[in-house]
């Protein structure tokens, strides 16, 4: 009897797994109506975008979510066995790093031309799909805008001790550090990182957690991307946090992109890129995630400072990728990661 | 570990029954289980000087020191709390002892990362009570507290069981000779339960060493978290493999230390029939003792339940409470855990059968090898399998099959302990009689031994089921795209600080675990708790 019971249990379990999977995972790249995306952008943000893509094209998206740097490293580790067909990264550095491994397929020039050359790979292996700026988010209960320095370099001052929050393993932070290296050199960047470390910052996992730390009073300022504020504000309209921009040319105001690179030549992968760079995809970034659209004819939300008015350091995004591995090392050397 | 002790009770070895196919099956299982460790060594060795230099960094030394300090603090605290509770419940006139006897063990049903979440929500930075109490519990203190609350039940269950087994005549004689209660406790009772305390302390230490969820939530950079972060951020992942080996070495050191301590303290408990002991009067100590029990159970059980209930109620009013989104992860959890439990028992059977029926040097070595995976924290098993599968097993990479394999590797020792005890309890003469009456070997095994051993096998499967439900690092690294479990659901919600979203999944985990733990406690099954602890982390 118990054997029969066990068999019954096993059948039930197998059925449950099937249900739990929701049928995904099966098929993979053999199935022409499915697309595997390694998504360095969070489900909360881009999940609805994938749904729109599915509705518009009938192609089902299987997304593996993770940090952009983590997924870039995963693609490198997987090599030829990678199931990824599209890499949708949070920043240009992670895309560049994957491009450097030689695994990205060239993109269609017509598609590339929709985007300003500043926001895509000079060699056409990845393309930006949305713009974002680095900002200093601050606690409006404790600080007034005039009290905030106009350069990121000032935060090594002792008066910011135990008041800073940042996410040292986040791809956007890494890209910002890479940009600082390109802008002022490794020595000054390392000194800055060490100065920040000496100020005993609170180290978090991502931008949202950093803003949460400000909101609950654990820190007063955080180094984040501009749109995280709006993401959190959608849930909590009374959030006591605002964005502060450093002066033109300062690495603290780096303008970066989220973008895609293709690991497969499949028509579904190309269709996905096209969708993101079409009006519907671009409008999604403008209205749903409060980012900057990158094609002509779609405007960003009025509450945002216009992209033309934000001037980051004089670096090209295409250079960030090659710097990523050594930037990760530099952050570690400064003691911000173990 | 159960096995080490059970060895003395080995009986009725019937040497004729180790068939070649059984041997092959057992060797295959042992080889498969050893795969992660072997590959980790290969990978680390291939890394060259650059990878190994990670060991020489000053940060690594600091991480190592922090890891050792956490293990030491949690082990000492859990042993003290668990031991004290066991004595109060078994030997004193504590009011409503039977209630406390069950309540003290129930925090076992709360996954440690859920306990940590509850602490963060109340006394963490910006927590509900943090400001009023001037508390800012995060980092070392928070991790130590959460892990102590999660591990003391193991010490408690084992020590309480030992106290019940211990011959009360010794304590009575000491009292009759005029010793005061504290002296009896120190000179007689404590030595009696020392092996149990030691075993409990070992479990607490191993649990802490392999824990990943608590230290991540508490942002404490100990080895498991650093390995995970290195894996996530570095392009060259070989240093993560080197640190993984360091964690394995640390685990082996803990095992050796415990074995030595046990060697000195030979079990002295006389196996006599248990009989009631006249309780020690606590006198004026009753109120503090009660307060102590209430505090521990309150923090370990009521606080997490209260916080989860609050989140669900608040989320419910905002329209984001319990909803259908929880169904797929719940089914995924239940399904994968049930299959892992069954698969682990099937894998354990040949090894257990071989050891029970032909206990020789090499079969014991085989068994020891299967237990070796025990020394591998989840994050290490996962890391090794990701490396191996991504490079050499493209077809299996990111499939449920590989995830299940990892669970079996990780939790085989739990199933093995159950299977071994169950099979040892079946008299082989019965199966031999069936053979003599004309049954073939397989048919005799299926008709006689299997049904008799079924309860023990089922118990093993239950523990693997429970451990798989709570498992975090292996699931995070190896699950197929789109596959969610309750544990990953809790995890992804907390990584964006959406605590209310984590609550339904967390509460469901507790609800599934509670009846299993309750059964274990009511049956006073210390050994089962021990096996369960082996799957921690």
Image: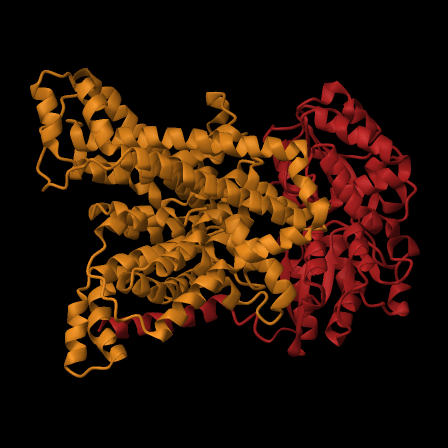
Chain colours: A red, B orange
The total of numbered circles placed on residues is 0
**In the shown orientation, is residue B325 left or right of residue B296?**
right
Relative height, residue B511 to residue B102 (above, below): below
Residue at the image position 82 percent from the left and 68 percent from the top = A105
- Point out residue B467 in the picture as x, y percentages from the top left corner: 40, 53
Residue furthest to the front in view is: B361
- Point out residue A27 in the picture as x, y percentages from the top left corner: 60, 76
**In the shown orientation, is residue A112 left or right of residue B51?**
right
Relative height, residue A72 to residue B225 (above, below): below
Say which of B22 and B336 sits in front.
B22
**In the shown orientation, is residue B434 left or right of residue B143?**
left
Residue at the image position 87 percent from the left and 52 percent from the top = A318
Whether residue A69 is visible, yes or no, is yes
- Point out residue B331 in the picture as x, y percentages from the top left corner: 43, 63
Residue furthest to the bottom in view is: B438
Relative height, residue A270 to residue B137 (above, below): below
Residue at the image position 27 percent from the left and 28 percent from the top = B84
Say which of A96 and A249 sits in front.
A96
Residue A213 location, quadrant: top right
Say which of B321 and B429 sits in front.
B429
Whether residue B307 is visible, yes or no, is no
Say which of B132 and A191 sits in front.
A191
Residue A242 location, quadrant: top right
Residue B161 location, quadrant: top left
- Point out residue A91 in the picture as x, y percentages from the top left corner: 77, 51
């Amino acid at each position: 009897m118990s054997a029969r019971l066990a068999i019954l249990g096993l059948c039930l379990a197998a059925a449950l797994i099937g249900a739990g999977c929701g049928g995904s995972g099966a098929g993979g790249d053999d199935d022409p109506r499915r697309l595997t995306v390694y998504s360095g952008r969070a489900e909360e943000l881009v999940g609805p975008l994938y749904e729109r893509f599915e509705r518009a094209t009938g192609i089902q998206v299987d997304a593996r979510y993770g940090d952009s740097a983590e997924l870039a490293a995963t693609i490198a580790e997987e090599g030829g066995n990678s199931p990824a067909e599209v890499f949708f990264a949070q920043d240009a550095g992670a895309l560049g790093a994957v491009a450097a491994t030689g695994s990205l397929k060239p993109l269609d020039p017509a598609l590339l031309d929709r985007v300003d050359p500043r926001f895509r790979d000079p060699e056409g292996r990845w393309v930006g799909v949305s713009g974002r700026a680095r900002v200093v988010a601050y606690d409006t209960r404790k600080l007034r805008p005039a009290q905030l320095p106009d350069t990121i370099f000032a935060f090594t001052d002792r008066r910011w001790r135990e008041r800073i929050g940042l996410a040292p393993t986040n791809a956007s932070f890494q890209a910002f550090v890479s940009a600082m290296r390109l802008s002022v050199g490794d020595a000054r960047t390392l000194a800055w990182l060490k100065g920040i470390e000496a100020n005993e910052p609170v180290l978090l996992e991502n931008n949202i957690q950093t803003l949460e730390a400000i909101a609950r009073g654990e820190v007063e300022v955080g180094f984040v991307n501009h749109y995280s504020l709006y993401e959190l504000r959608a849930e909590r309209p009374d959030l006591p946090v605002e964005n502060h921009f450093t002066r033109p040319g300062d690495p603290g105001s780096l303008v970066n992109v989220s973008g895609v690179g293709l690991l497969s030549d499949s028509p579904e992968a190309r269709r996905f890129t096209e969708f993101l760079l079409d009006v519907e995809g671009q409008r999604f970034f403008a209205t749903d995630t409060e980012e900057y659209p990158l094609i002509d004819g779609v405007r960003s939300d009025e509450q945002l400072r216009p992209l033309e008015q934000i001037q980051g350091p004089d670096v090209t995004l295409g250079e960030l990728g090659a710097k990523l591995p050594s930037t990760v090392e530099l952050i570690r050397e400064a003691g911000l990661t173990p | 570990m159960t096995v080490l002790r059970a060895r003395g009770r080995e009986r009725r070895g019937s040497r004729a029954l180790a068939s070649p196919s059984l041997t092959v099956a057992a060797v295959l299982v042992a080889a498969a289980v050893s795969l992660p460790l072997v590959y980790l060594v290969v990978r680390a060795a291939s890394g060259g000087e650059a990878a190994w230099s990670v060991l020489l960094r000053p940060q690594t030394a600091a991480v190592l020191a922090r890891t050792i300090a956490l293990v030491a603090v949690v082990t000492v605290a859990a042993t003290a709390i668990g031991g004290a509770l066991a004595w109060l419940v078994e030997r004193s006139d504590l009011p409503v002892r039977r209630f406390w006897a069950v309540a003290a063990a129930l925090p076992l049903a709360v996954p440690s990362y859920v306990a940590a979440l509850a602490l963060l929500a109340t006394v963490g930075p910006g927590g509900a009570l943090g400001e009023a109490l001037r508390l800012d519990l995060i980092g070392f203190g928070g991790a130590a507290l959460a892990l102590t609350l999660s591990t003391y039940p193991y010490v408690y269950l084992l020590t309480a069981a030992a106290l019940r087994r211990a011959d009360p005549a010794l304590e009575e004689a000491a009292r009759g000779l005029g010793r005061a209660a504290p002296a009896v406790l120190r000179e007689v009772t404590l030595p009696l339960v020392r092996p149990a305390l030691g075993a409990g302390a070992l479990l607490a230490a191993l649990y802490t060493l392999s824990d990943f969820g608590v230290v991540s939530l508490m942002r404490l950079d100990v080895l498991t978290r650093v390995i995970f972060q290195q894996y996530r951020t570095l392009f060259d992942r070989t240093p993560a493999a080197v640190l993984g080996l360091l964690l394995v070495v640390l685990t082996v050191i803990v095992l050796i230390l415990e074995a030595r301590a046990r060697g000195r303290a030979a079990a002295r408990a006389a196996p006599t029939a248990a009989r009631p002991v006249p309780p020690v009067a606590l006198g004026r100590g009753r109120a503090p003792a009660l307060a102590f029990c209430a505090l521990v159970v309150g923090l370990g059980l009521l606080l997490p339940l209260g916080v989860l209930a609050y989140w669900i109620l608040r989320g419910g009013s905002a329209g984001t409470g319990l909803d259908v989104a929880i169904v797929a992860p719940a089914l995924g959890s239940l399904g994968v855990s049930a299959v892992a439990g069954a698969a682990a028992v099937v894998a354990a059977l040949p090894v257990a059968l071989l050891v029970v029926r032909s206990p020789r040097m090499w079969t014991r070595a085989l068994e020891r090898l299967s237990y070796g995976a025990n020394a591998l924290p989840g994050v290490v098993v996962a890391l090794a399998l990701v490396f191996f599968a991504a490079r050499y097993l493209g077809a299996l990479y990111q499939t449920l099959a590989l995830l299940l394999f990892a669970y079996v590797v990780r939790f085989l020792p739990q199933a093995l302990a159950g299977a071994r005890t169950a099979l040892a309890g079946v008299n082989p003469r019965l199966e031999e009689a069936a053979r003599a009456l004309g049954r073939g070997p397989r048919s005799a095994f299926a008709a006689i031994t299997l049904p008799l051993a079924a309860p023990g096998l089922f118990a093993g499967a239950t523990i693997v089921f429970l451990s798989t439900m709570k498992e975090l690092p292996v699931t995070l690294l190896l699950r197929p795209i789109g596959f969610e479990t309750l544990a990953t659901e809790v995890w992804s919600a907390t990584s964006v600080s959406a605590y209310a979203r984590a609550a339904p999944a967390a509460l469901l985990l507790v609800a599934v675990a509670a009846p299993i733990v309750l059964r274990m406690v009511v049956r006073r099954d210390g050994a089962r708790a021990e096996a369960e602890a082996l799957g921690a982390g």
